[in-house]
Amino acid sequence: QPGQHYSMGGIATKYKGDFGETNLSGLYVIGECSCLSVHGANRLGGNSLLETSVFGRAIGRNLLKKSLPDLPSIDFVKEAENNARNSVETLLNQWENNDGKTPIEIRNVMGDIMNRNVGVFRKQDDLEKAYEDLKILQKDFLNVHVKTLDRKFNYGLIRTLELRNMLDIAEVTAYAALWRKESRGAHYRLDHKTRDDENFLCHSLVYRTKDGLELKKKPVSLGIFEVKERVY
């Protein structure tokens, strides 16, 4: 069966400004985690390595021109490390006392949801089911039970931390696919088989708010290239 091995989205970068710059001052994203918008809606095989090389170099050179200090202040580094450590420790203490499902149980259910409902061919009722089921899984994860919380060489613990992020990405993917009522690039809707430039020629940015997920549009910079159907 087809396997998902690349995400053509990522952490949002500014539409105007430095490549890789985010809305959080001082934070730049480089590599496959970033959304630099060089692939359009369908990446060509091999292009992600090219993207990482080209924009990694370009962003690095641009940052050097900003006359930034070679190293951040020691106090800043210690504060950042302590905040990250405390955040993880809070999770570990909670997981140790939980009595819910194991990480592998949640991950298997998540994979089944995505394979069945958010795969190559998508439609409204499947996407709605996936989105609702993923919200339930998010609640299940709050009570996830990790059998061993050893801090050394504990790959199970690493996978649990990764699962926390994967659930967010899965939920966002289902939410954005449900909103985009058209077919474009690698996103193919059985119930909306044509492209709809009037309503959906845009990037879809998803934010988590206190009221749940929120989607905002960002314009697509087409440059000299007109939008047209990709055929073989």
Image (cartoon, grey):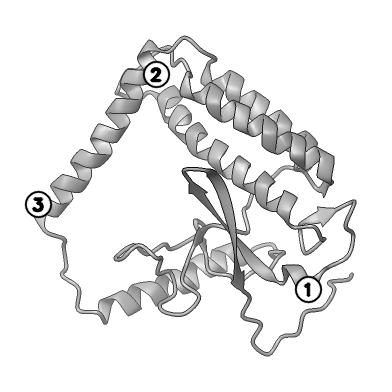
Please, is residue 208 above or below residue 82 in the view? below
**Is disc 2 surrounded by few (<14), some (14 to 19) or many (20+) residues within 10 Å?**
many
Query: Which quarter of the figure has residue 205?
Result: bottom right
Name the foreground residue: 48 vs 102: 102
Where is residue 37? Give x, y as percent: 58, 70
Residue located beneath label 3 in the image? 75
Please, is residue 202 above or below residue 146 in the view? below
Query: Which quarter of the figure has residue 85?
Result: top left
Spatial CA distance of label 2 from label 3 is: 30 Å
Residue type of the residue flagged with mark 1: Asp
Whether residue 120 is visible here, answered yes or no, is: yes
- Mark nearer the N terminus (3 vs 1): 3
Residue located beneath label 2 in the image? 95
Where is residue 146? Give x, y as percent: 44, 16
Residue 9: mark: none
Residue, x 75% and y 69% (percent of image)? Answer: 199
Where is residue 180? Give x, y as percent: 74, 57
Residue located beneath label 1 in the image? 197
Where is residue 60? Give x, y as percent: 34, 72
The number of discs equals: 3
Name the foreground residue: 194 vs 58: 194
Residue type of the residue flagged with mark 3: Asp
Q: Quadrant of the N terminus?
A: top right
Residue, x 57% and y 21% (percent of image)? Answer: 104
